[in-house]
Image: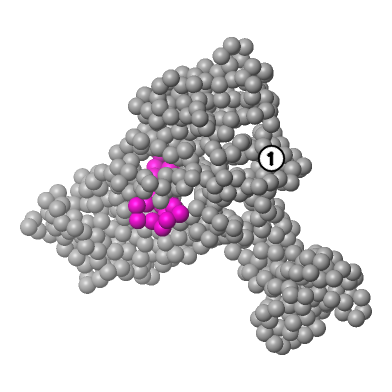
Amino acid sequence: MGIESGLVKFGSWAPDVSDINTGVSANILNVVPRADGYGPFPDFQAFTQALPSQCRGFFFARNADSSIAIFAGTASDLYLLNNSTFAWTKVSLSGGYSALSSNANWQFVQFNTNVIAVQVNAPPQIYTLGTSTNFANLGGSPPQASYVAIINRFLVLAGISGFPYRVQWSGLNALTTWDNITAQSNFQDLADGGLVTGIAGGDQFGVIFQQTSIRSMIFAPGSAVVFDILRIATNDGLLAPQAVITAADNIFFCSPQGFKMIAPGGYPTPIGREQVDRTFFANVDTANLQLFIAATDPTTTRVYFAYKSQHGTQGQFDTVLVYDIVLQRWTPLKVSGQYLTALARPGLTLEALDAIAPGIINITGAANNGHGAVRLTLSGLTAGTPPSNTNLNIENTVTVYGVVGTTEANGTHRFTIVDSTHIDLIGSTFTNAYVSGGSIGGALDQLGFSLDAISLASLVQLAMVGPTNAVGFFTGPNLEGTMETPEQDAQGRRVFVSAIRPMTDAPNAAVSLAVRDTAQATSVYTAETTVNQIGVSPIQGGGIDTRYVRAKVRNPYGSVWTYCMGVEPEFRLTGTV
């Protein structure tokens, strides 16, 4: 296959193999697969206030009223998100926990109204939604464990302290039953296959990962053994404990052999072989596999594998591999963060959103205004009435939160501006002396996400804990996306390319060519040109004569577009030398 007239489509991203006349593309970045080519991927936008330190585990649970409870773990504590202020409240067991090792994370599951959190340095922790104020040790003396899953109606633990080859489960529907007798609670020591390195749950069956074996774990009602534990793969395992995710009833994971999938009742099937596996293993930092984290976005048919590259920043992943389950295609993203997960955005009132909007004003005092109402002293304002660098002069109400002492000030109030550092809260009654703290929310029109997203509060979406410890969603401007065609040649002839027509709805697409004269040479890129009024990008200098050529399309950061299919080249064949 040589260079073609008409549409040259962008190929599937498969950097493991040569792209010379193979129909695959070696260079794709910051886009996601579509049936007609590629589409944009939005940037990260923070949604919460920052955790006190680096995130080492993340989870959301649904309360009985369908509201959301969001938990996060650091090296030594557990936190719950305040859905009104988006600040984090410590909910650790009294006294906290022994610090996680540098290569470990917390793991969480929800069992009815209970959230279970595990790490090997502490007994399994339980938090009952709606009643608990802090995590507590799970009753029944369960073992300390690194990994947790729910299989059928059993809580299953693995990576057990002192018993690294063991898998142990609670009683049926009995979280605090661990005597290995009652309600079918029991354990199984695995005779071979090495240490247990992870576990994935499911309705009727789960999967146990070991260093050199993978086993299914199938509930067998009425059987004395409780679970049928059967080997489904030898000389295979799980590369990292967090590098496994269940999506569309399938289990997706990365083994030491590459990326794979297990269908219900099936066996591991490669999904990255001769596509991305070699590239991944050449790039991943194997000394920091705690940052190798799998996630899914239920709003799409994609799974995501985040990892730290060998040259990435310590404590952060910097690359995400995207796999589209339906299209069976991959793409890479250059995204940095601490933890990748799926999250439902908490439902909020507009008043609650004030608390997280930019332009927050600090409160430094509260007193009686002389007429019985609360007068607040504000800091950091520019002189003038109204203050010139705040939004107080355009807001009808303010939301006050976090005041200690004069707690009657907290809430939403109409107000009047007294001067550049004071406002009075209309209708309030001053009662309690001011102690400390307090803030006024910022401007809603400066929020980093659309208010339309709040209507999707219960919809689970891909989320991330970003580099500064704050949680957010991928709702920002589109990342800069680059796509290259497979490399083309003219079957021994030279070719002169004069212009390229990019097939995209991006209004400011920039086009260049990667050219070389031999398969042994390194490609050189021409200068970029943008599309003209007829949708064509002329090649600078009138064109270029070459033997091997790729077309590159770059859609700049923030560009609004939906698809990019490929290019239509304008060319003619020239000589044979």
Outermost residue toward the bottom in this view: 384
Within the image, what quadrant is residue 454 found in?
bottom right
Give the camera-side residue of 428 and 9: 428
Residue at point 61%, 49% (across, down): 77
Residue 84 placement (x, y as % from top left): 72, 57
Q: Which residues are magenta?
A: 309-332
**Residue 299 included in the magenta stretch of the image:** no
The reply to whether residue 502 is in sight is: no
The reply to whether residue 312 is in sight is: yes
Inspect the image, locate mark 1, and give the three-letter code of the amino acid beneath it.
Ala
Residue at point 63%, 69% (across, down): 358
Give the camera-side residue of 263 and 365: 365
Residue 186 placement (x, y as % from top left): 59, 20
Residue at point 15%, 52% (across, down): 519
Within the image, what quadrant is residue 549 found in?
bottom left
Say few, some or many: other residues with alpha carbon within 10 Å of mark 1 (under 14 / 14 to 19 / 20 or more). Answer: some
Residue 36 placement (x, y as % from top left): 41, 48
Residue at point 43%, 29% (across, down): 195
Which quarter of the figure is the C terminus placed in? bottom left
**Residue 311 included in the magenta stretch of the image:** yes
The residue pinned by badge 1 equals 136
Outermost residue toward the right in this view: 371
